[in-house]
Amino acid sequence: MSDATANTPIENTNNTVDTAEEMDSEIESLKKENEELRVQSESMRAKLLEANMLANNYLEEMEKLKEQLERITSPPLFIATVMETEDDMALIRQHGNNQEVVTQIPAEFKDEIEPGVRVSINAAFSIVSVMRKATDMRAQIMEVISSPDVDYDMIGGLDDVLNEVIESVEMPLTEPELFDKIGIEPPSGVLMYGDPGTGKTLIAKAVASRAHASFIRMSGSDLVQKFIGEGARLVKDVFQMARDKSPCILFIDEIDAVGGMRTHDGTTGSAEVNRTMLQLLSEMDGFEPRGQVKIIAATNRIDLLDPALLRPGRFDRVIEVPIPDEKAREDIFRIHTRHMNLADDVDMTKLAKMANGLSGADLKIIVKEAGMFVLRRRGEQITMKDLTEAFNKVTTEEEQNTASGMFA
């Protein structure tokens, strides 16, 4: 009896130990199972996220395909021009077949629809959108939106010419009330002529900069096109763009390329040039007013221009831009050397006397060549010797070019 009683606590202790070990083992098993479930959950979550991303991509692709299908299957639109308007109705003429129909003006386009406006229409002749004015792409390329970075203080020796151009071009744009008080119309255009390099283009840029106007620059040769009618259309588009961008200064350089005396040698080329010039004459002095569009033209050969181009009403002011005199040459030298490091022996008056007969462009080249001489010897100052050698080099090259041109 006593032996059985003594063994009972030992057995209970052993059972307790076994139970604890089993519980620890079960806990470890549950932890492992929990970790496996957590890993599976993370994997499923990543797959779900990937599936959502794929679904979104597929939805976007479906939307793109739907838009593309709608674009492909939708009927094309036609271009028409509004001929007349009355109340909420418009008479339009379809391009191509010239069919005229009367259609209703949509409420959202009432403020934009007017005679001459281009619109797109569907097969039912309903106005779908209002289009911008048709302008030749070449005319748009010619436009310079920002004013040129040139001022009057960068032009030397041309005070009289500048004053005439300012009165004719700048003042009508900046102070039109002065002309209204007197009761006169400002000059319609300015033609500058003179030898190459005298500053004609520079004056046009300076006026555009001061007037804070859009500046359209083109060469007369740009208006001479290959196919019949293209040159005249380009002239019309350029002037229309100038009106749309007003106040605007239209500068035609080398106008003798398109404004020469009219001749006919039996070829379509000369006839096309004549048509282009006739369109230019019409735009300069036609029925449609130019408004705040001022024209400046430049040429080296005024003797080649057609008399119709020179008459008052087209170019009211014909201004000669002369070769600079001694005082003007000194001013030009000072302008081009004002930012340079000059030695004390530089004598501008002597340089101006040496450069008799040279243009402003020639004087600028002389200053640049002198700077290149200093750069070549790794110097820091431009001396009188540098300027003299540059003068000799430039004048010698000009004499050689003139001589070779005589026997070419």
Image (cartoon, rainbow, N blue to C red):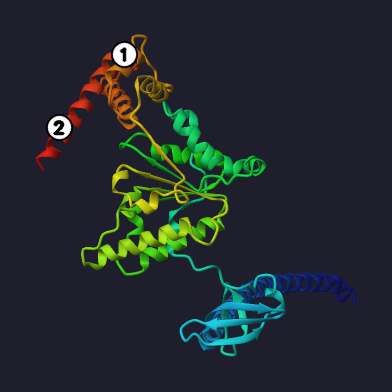
Picture quadrant where residue 121 is located = bottom right
Rendered position, 284 above or below 150: below
Foreground: 113 or 33? 113
Q: Amino acid at mark 2?
A: Gln
> Residue tagged by mark 1?
350
> Residue tagged by mark 2?
400
Residue 321 location (% of width, % of height)? 38, 34
Foreground: 140 or 183? 183
Residue 200 location (% of width, % of height)? 39, 38
Q: Amino acid at mark 1?
A: Lys
Q: Which quadrant: the C terminus?
A: top left
Q: Which quadrant: the N terminus?
A: bottom right
Foreground: 160 or 65? 160
Q: Residue drawn 51% across and 55% down?
A: 242
Q: Residues within 10 Å of mark 2 (few under 14, many from 20)?
A: few
Residue 181 location (% of width, % of height)? 67, 41
State whether residue 234 appears in this view. yes
Picture quadrant where residue 212 is located = top right
**Numbered disc 2: secondary structure:** helix
Q: Residue drawn 33% across and 55% down?
A: 258
Q: Residues within 10 Å of mark 1 (few under 14, many from 20)?
A: few
Give the side of residue 250 with respect to residue 7, left or right. Answer: left
Rendered position, 182 above or below 76: above
What label sits on residue 37 in the rendered view? none
Question: Which label's residue is closer to the chain start, 2 or 1?
Answer: 1
Residue 184 location (% of width, % of height)? 60, 44
Foreground: 189 or 145? 189
